[in-house]
Image: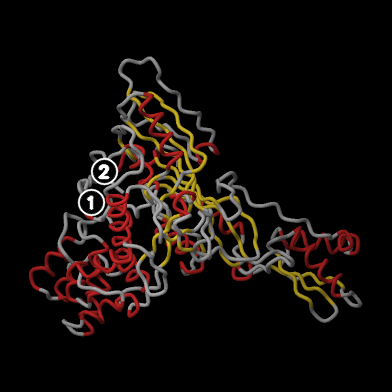
């Protein structure tokens, strides 16, 4: 797998950019007043690199594909005690020249000494297994089953942690592939968050007592690598990260160097409106917030219809069209190539539970899928409130705002209400707005009424979040990237990689060379920055360029 692997294949499956989609999900305003410029984001998936930042602030990188060094057990006593004849018999057993077990005298040995004897056998002959018997340690050929279940070393922490590097594959797909290859449930693998599909990304994963050798066997597969194996006392859980480090190429940029410099300066100093990016609302013509709104309204038939609504092409087109035509779950199901998808689960539930049992069908979906729809609606409301606030009040701190100091990785603290004195001293970066829910505090100013107004427009009230057990949370109005760097480069080959991934560096791929002075060269901007978790890099790039990101998709790009 090289930096070029598979990039060209994206051209065969074009997706039309959804122009105007940003406005449909409440994304309309900017922080800076700079000129902006045009460019193409994610023309190749190698133009978008993401490295997780762990809770300690360290950028997670794939630096080795080698197993971790094994601590050498103290076996000097055992080596001196076992006779030369017994050692010769063990060699014969390991080489297949002997089938009878070897009996090592163990009468009178302490538990520690017997442990050293077992460790000595494992260290010298890993495919032999030893058992304590009546006054002996019995050494024989190990079975395949026993080899798979080697004892976990005493004193070693119980969780194997490792770096997952993946290309053009989302985290859920990668985790499912790994689980399949290791013959375990996906839930056995812990991770801090999901990473974009269309890019090259690194993040930490964990698994309980997974041998390093077994894990490294995954590296014969394409599109992913595992490495940097360590052992920890605790599993990695959702949210166990400070954020992400991004390295991004914007190709075919226009504007002057001064335009670029001013845009980067504004982004670095003033940040961007911390909108939920368009990815939050799905990649199809039916957005997640539309389904979430129908669920909160109790319009379950509409929610099912939205999930199954016909849309452009794809493997599910025949199934969707059949549902729209006949509303016959069985006939629609028969046109599905595979039934494990969301559409398949809905249709199977309708087939079993009754053609009009729409609520029952929706409850058959995994809880995280239903939450995805509900959170989509919360995010839509939040985006609309941000835009309305900036249109009405600009970028000022208001009395009654909720204030919370920004902390990488988030905080469990509750916000405080801004006083008149805070207006002149507090930073806009301290202002938070709640996602609507039953357990959050709302601003003590005009914005509190705006929440109710938006919900009323959709036929909802705050009670809808209580009945759906959606507690809400706080999100900063503005996010500011950290450690921002940038440079302009020139290139002539549109297929050439302009960034090196972690795997490229491991494989010794040379640094890309800028084609300065070539009259046929195009310009690109390479930008690197860090963001706290839950911030969207696409919204930072939108602020930088002052352009609607739904128009960025290059012809033939996907993901």
The single residue placed furthest to the left in the displayed view is 325
Is the Cβ of the residue at disc 2 closer than 8 Å to that at disc 1? yes
Q: Quadrant of the N terminus?
A: top left
Residue 425: percent from left, percent from top: 49, 49
Q: Is residue 220 visible?
A: no
Badge 2 density bin: few <14, some 14–19, many ≥20, Cα 10 Å? some
**Going from the N terminus, do you reach mark 2 or mark 1 first?**
1
Say which residue appears at 50% left-offset and 29% top-offset: 510
Disc 2 designates what residue?
Answer: 548
The color scheme shown is: secondary structure
Q: In the image, 370: left or right of 74?
A: left
Q: Which of the 4 image quadrants contains residue 94?
A: bottom right
User: In the depicted view, which residue is nearer to us: 159 or 541?
Assistant: 541
Q: Tell me the quarter of the picture where residue 76 sits.
A: bottom right
Task: Classify mark 1: residues with Cα within 10 Å, few (<14), some (14-19) or many (20+).
Answer: some
Mark carried by residue 23: 1
* Residue lying at 24% horizontally and 73% vertically, measured from the top left: 460
Q: Residue at x 33, y 69 (%)?
A: 369
* Secondary element type, mark 1: helix
Secondary structure under the numbered disc 2 in the rendered image:
loop
Q: CA distance from mark 2 to mark 1?
A: 9 Å
């Amino acid at each position: 797998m090289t930096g070029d692997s598979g990039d060209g294949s994206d051209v065969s499956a074009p997706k039309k950019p959804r122009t105007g989609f940003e406005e449909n999900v409440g994304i309309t305003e900017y922080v800076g007043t700079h000129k902006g410029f045009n460019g193409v984001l994610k023309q190749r998936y190698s133009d978008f690199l993401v490295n997780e930042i762990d809770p300690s602030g360290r950028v997670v990188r794939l630096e080795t594909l080698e197993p971790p060094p094994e601590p050498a057990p103290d076996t000097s006593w055992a080596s001196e005690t076992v006779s030369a004849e017994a050692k010769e018999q063990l060699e014969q057993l390991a080489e297949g020249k002997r089938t009878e077990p070897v009996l090592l005298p163990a009468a009178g040995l302490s538990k520690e000494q017997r442990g050293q004897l077992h460790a000595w056998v494992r260290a010298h002959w890993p495919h032999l297994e030893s058992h304590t018997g009546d006054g002996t340690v019995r050494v024989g050929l190990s079975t395949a089953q026993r080899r798979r279940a080697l004892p976990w070393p005493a004193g070693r922490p119980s969780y194997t942690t490792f770096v997952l590097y993946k290309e053009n594959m989302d985290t859920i797909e990668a985790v499912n592939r790994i689980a399949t290859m290791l013959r375990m449930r996906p839930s056995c693998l812990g991770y801090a968050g999901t990473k974009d599909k269309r890019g090259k990304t690194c993040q930490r994963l964990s698994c309980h007592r997974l041998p390093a050798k077994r894990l490294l066997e995954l590296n014969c597969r394409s599109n992913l690598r595992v490495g940097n194996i360590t052992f920890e006392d605790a599993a990695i859980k959702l949210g166990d990260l400070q954020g992400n480090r991004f390295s991004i190429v914007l190709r075919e940029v226009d504007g002057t160097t001064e335009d670029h410099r001013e845009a980067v300066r504004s982004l670095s100093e003033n940040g961007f409106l911390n909108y939920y990016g368009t990815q939050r609302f799905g990649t199809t013509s039916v957005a997640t917030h539309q389904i979430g709104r129908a669920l909160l309204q109790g319009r379950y038939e509409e929610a099912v219809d939205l999930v199954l609504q016909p849309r452009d092409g794809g493997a599910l087109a025949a199934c969707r069209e059949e549902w729209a035509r006949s509303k016959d779950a069985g006939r629609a199901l028969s046109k599905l190539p595979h039934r494990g998808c969301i559409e398949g689960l809905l249709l199977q539930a309708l087939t079993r539970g009754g053609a009009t049992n729409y609520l029952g069908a929706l409850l058959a979906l995994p809880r995280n899928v239903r939450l995805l729809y509900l959170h989509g609606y919360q995010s839509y409301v939040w985006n609309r409130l941000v835009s309305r606030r900036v249109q009405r009040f600009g970028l000022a701190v208001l009395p009654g705002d909720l204030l919370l100091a920004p902390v990488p990785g988030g905080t469990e603290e509750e916000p405080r209400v801004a006083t008149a004195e805070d207006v002149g001293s507090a930073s806009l970066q301290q202002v938070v707005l709640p996602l609507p829910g039953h357990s959050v505090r709302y601003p003590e100013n005009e914005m509190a009424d705006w929440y109710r107004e938006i919900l009323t427009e959709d036929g909802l009230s705050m009670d809808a979040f209580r009945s759906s057990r959606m507690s809400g949370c706080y999100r900063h109005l503005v996010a500011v990237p950290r450690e921002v760097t940038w440079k302009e480069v020139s290139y002539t080959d549109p297929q050439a990689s302009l960034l090196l991934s972690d795997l490229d560096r491991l494989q010794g791929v040379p640094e890309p060379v800028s084609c300065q002075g070539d009259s046929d060269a195009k310009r690109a901007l390479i930008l690197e920055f860090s963001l706290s978790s839950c911030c969207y890099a696409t919204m930072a790039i939108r602020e930088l360029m002052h352009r609607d990101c739904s128009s960025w998709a290059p012809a033939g790009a996907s993901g």
